[in-house]
């Protein structure tokens, strides 16, 4: 195991996030969390317990009021917005409850957008990789359709492919199956599981679906912005 | 990377085709009208200045000094006060005119003629009117003024064959009801009277000249004025009219007499043109500002509509600068497209305007609208438009780039 991989891929240290205002709202409080490579983590908890807030903080979309987030062992609190954006581009992939695909672009183009932003491949390689990702998710024949021509489950699979585009170490998913029917939920879940099992990436998913959470390898349960329990059933990187 | 940004920007504006088209048309109309207006204003100014340059001597040297002659008391005492002092009656006229002419010929790039200007009264039949007589050398006169070209009847050089011939404006001839070949009686203020034969009629288009101006031989003018050999004006026509200011100053330094360039003589007019140009650019700026609002409007709408896209692009790892660039280039693209279309429109409008013909019977006659084609107008209008478009795109772009993706994503769920 290399030194890089020895460090947790994402870690939170004494992290608190308070929304300022006349009545300040504490979203999460005193979070200490280490997530290693190859983990499949469910963040659960009742509504308003700070699940999504925690995910956004771990994904550098939001900045903690106190404490820090480290990515691959490196602190991020001194990075400016553009540097955090670049780190997201390279190491993190997001999937949200809604697909958030760009409606004017085809499936294939949506997936190449993050690759084009990073600019590390030729256009041909980008298209090839996008097609491979679609093939792997059983969407190979939908490459030239627009998002509005796809079903909800198909769109969410494209969103996953887009999150994987730049080969990130971690996929952060916020209720990825929250708006899907049971069949699509099963498809998307098995894709996320494969990402962990076959590719060795880390997946952190916020979910309120207890069945799904129980099938994941680690469950972090939040109550009122604090970690209530953190159970590992199967550790990553066997 | 840049191609990605322009791809996204173009999809955005293509998604609002009609509004985009309206905004582009707004810019195009602004640019087009500005160009047409500038062409017209510049054209009329150019034509006016050209007719001014043609009608007047480029440098006019008269028998005056800018400063009154110094009094002997001034020369002796540092501080001298005197009142009711009247200078000795000077003999008017340019002294040593021949010498001055020789000196001018040495360094002035152009032609000069020495002449005597006399106020007189012209009578024919029962009609009587005051006129300005200029006694000149007809051959040289042809080189320094455009009377030769403005002759309607007879020729300027016919004067040479008739010592007491006179060439007058056609309006003056009408007033006195005389024609070529008729006789007119001219009396000077010194009460010397001579009969002159009309050898030609001119029409310059300048009312003051056509109404009360006559050209005679220099000798004849000197006789009428009772001042043999006197000259009170040297008129210079330069090959480069724009150098008149410098040449006038040089002449004045050299010979001491007041030398007035055409620019100085028409200072207030040129100032008025300057102010007119400022007004023109203000109006152009205002038109394009309005066009800018159209762009501001549509880019604002797009940023608002696309806030989800902005959020997702930011969560994917797009920097604020990228987002700014996307919307800035949307504004710029519209400004650019509008400018190009506006160029075509402006060019077309200018062509149409220049073909409009009409006649007016006053002052200098214009038979068509004067227009000037100047690439600078195109450049200025387009830069105004593009600056307005960039600003109009930048303001919403900056706002969009600062959008917090978490707010949007939370709002959507």
Image (cartoon, coloured by chain):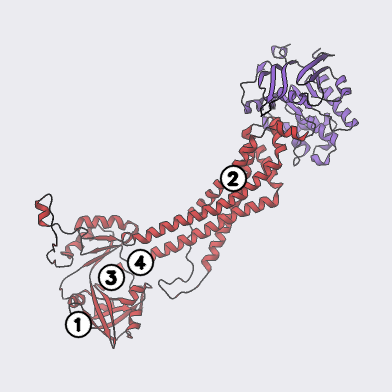
Chain colours: A purple, B red
- Which residue is label 4 attached to? B54
- Name the chain letter of the residue that bears numbered label 1: B
Q: Which mark's residue is nearer the viewer, 4 or 3?
A: 4
* Helix, strand or loop under label 2: helix
For this rendering, which residue is in front, B301 or A102?
Answer: B301
For this rendering, which residue is in front, B134 or B309?
Answer: B309
Confirm or deny contact between disc 4 and disc 1 (CB under 8 A).
no
Q: CA distance from mark 2 to mark 4?
A: 47 Å
Residue A232, position in %: x, y? 82, 14
Q: Residues within 10 Å of mark 1 (few under 14, many from 20)?
A: some
Residue B52, position in %: x, y? 36, 65
- Name the chain letter of the residue that bears numbered label 4: B
Residue B395, position in %: x, y? 60, 41
- Which residue is label 3 attached to? B141
Q: Earlier in the sequence, mark 1 or mark 2?
A: 1
Q: Earlier in the sequence, mark 1 or mark 3?
A: 3
* Helix, strand or loop under label 3: helix
Q: Which mark's residue is nearer the viewer, 2 or 4?
A: 2
Q: Residues within 10 Å of mark 2 (few under 14, many from 20)?
A: many
Residue at (23%, 70%) from the top-left corner? Answer: B115
Residue at (46%, 56%) from the top-left corner? Answer: B279
- Is residue B109 in view from this perspective? yes
Quadrant of the rendered structure where residue B156 is?
Answer: bottom left
Q: Is residue A160 left or right of residue B353?
A: right
- Which residue is label 2 attached to? B392
Q: CA distance from mark 1 to mark 2?
A: 76 Å
Outermost residue toward the front in this view: A22
Q: CA distance from mark 4 to mark 1?
A: 32 Å
Outermost residue toward the right in this view: A183
- Which residue is label 1 attached to? B193
Q: Earlier in the sequence, mark 4 or mark 1?
A: 4
């Amino acid at each position: 195991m290399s030194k890089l991989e020895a460090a947790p891929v994402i870690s939170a240290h004494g992290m608190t996030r308070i929304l300022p205002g006349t009545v300040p709202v504490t979203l999460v409080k005193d979070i200490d969390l280490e997530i290693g490579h190859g983990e499949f983590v469910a963040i659960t908890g009742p509504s308003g317990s700070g699940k999504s807030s925690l995910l956004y903080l771990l994904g550098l979309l939001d900045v903690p009021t106190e404490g820090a987030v480290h990515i691959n062992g490196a602190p991020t609190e001194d990075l400016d917005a553009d540097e955090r954006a670049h780190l997201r581009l390279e190491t993190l992939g997001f999937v949200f409850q809604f697909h958030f695909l760009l409606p004017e672009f085809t499936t294939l183009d949506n997936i190449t957008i993050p690759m084009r932003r990073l600019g590390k491949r030729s256009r041909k390689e980008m298209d090839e990789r996008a097609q491979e990702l679609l093939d792997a998710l059983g969407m190979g024949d939908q490459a030239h359709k627009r998002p509005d021509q796809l079903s909800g489950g198909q769109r969410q699979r494209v969103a996953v492919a887009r999150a994987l585009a730049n080969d990130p170490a971690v996929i952060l998913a916020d209720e990825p199956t929250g708006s899907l029917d049971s069949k699509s939920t099963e498809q998307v879940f098995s894709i996320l599981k494969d990402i962990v099992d076959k590719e060795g990436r880390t997946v952190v998913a916020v979910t309120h679906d207890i069945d799904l959470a129980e099938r994941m390898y680690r469950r972090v349960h939040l109550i009122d912005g604090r970690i209530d329990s953190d159970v590992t059933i199967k550790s990553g990187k066997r | 990377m840049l191609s990605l940004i322009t791809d996204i920007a173009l999809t955005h504006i293509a998604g609002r085709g009609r509004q985009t088209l309206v905004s582009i048309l707004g810019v195009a109309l602004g640019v087009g009208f500005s160009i047409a207006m500038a062409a017209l204003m510049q054209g009329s100014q150019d034509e006016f200045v050209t007719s001014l340059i043609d009608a007047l001597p480029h440098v006019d040297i008269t028998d005056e000094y800018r400063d009154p002659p110094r009094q002997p008391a001034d020369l002796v005492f540092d501080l001298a006060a005197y009142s009711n002092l009247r200078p000795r009656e000077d003999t008017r006229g340019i002294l040593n005119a021949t010498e001055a002419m020789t000196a001018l010929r040495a360094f002035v790039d152009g032609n000069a003629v020495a002449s005597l200007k006399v106020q007189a009264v012209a009578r024919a039949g029962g009609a009587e009117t005051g006129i300005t007589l200029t006694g000149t050398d007809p051959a040289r006169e042809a080189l320094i003024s455009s009377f030769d070209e403005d002759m309607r009847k007879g020729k300027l050089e016919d004067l040479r064959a008739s010592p007491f011939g006179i060439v007058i404006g056609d309006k003056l001839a009408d007033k006195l009801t005389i024609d070529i070949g008729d006789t007119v009686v001219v009396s000077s203020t010194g009460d010397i009277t001579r009969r002159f034969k009309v050898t030609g009629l001119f029409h310059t288009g300048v009312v003051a000249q056509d109404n009360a101006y006559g050209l005679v031989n220099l000798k004849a003018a000197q006789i009428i004025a009772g001042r043999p050999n006197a000259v009170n004006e040297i008129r210079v026509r330069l090959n480069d009219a724009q150098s008149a200011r410098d040449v006038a100053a040089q002449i004045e330094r050299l010979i001491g007499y007041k030398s007035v360039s055409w620019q100085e003589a028409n200072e207030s007019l040129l100032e008025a043109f300057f102010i007119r140009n400022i007004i023109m650019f203000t109006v152009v700026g205002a038109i394009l500002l309005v066009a800018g609002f159209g762009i501001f409007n549509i880019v604002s709408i797009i940023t608002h509509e696309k806030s989800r896209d902005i959020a997702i692009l930011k969560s994917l790892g797009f920097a604020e600068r990228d987002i700014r660039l996307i919307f800035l280039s949307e504004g710029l693209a519209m400004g650019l497209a509008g400018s190009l279309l506006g160029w075509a429109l402006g060019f077309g409008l200018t062509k149409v305007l220049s073909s409009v013909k009409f006649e007016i019977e006053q002052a200098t006659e214009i038979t068509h609208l004067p227009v000037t084609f100047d690439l600078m107008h195109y450049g200025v209008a387009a830069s105004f438009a593009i600056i307005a478009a960039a600003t109009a795109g930048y303001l919403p772009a900056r706002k969009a780039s600062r959008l917090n993706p978490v707010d949007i994503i939370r709002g959507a769920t």
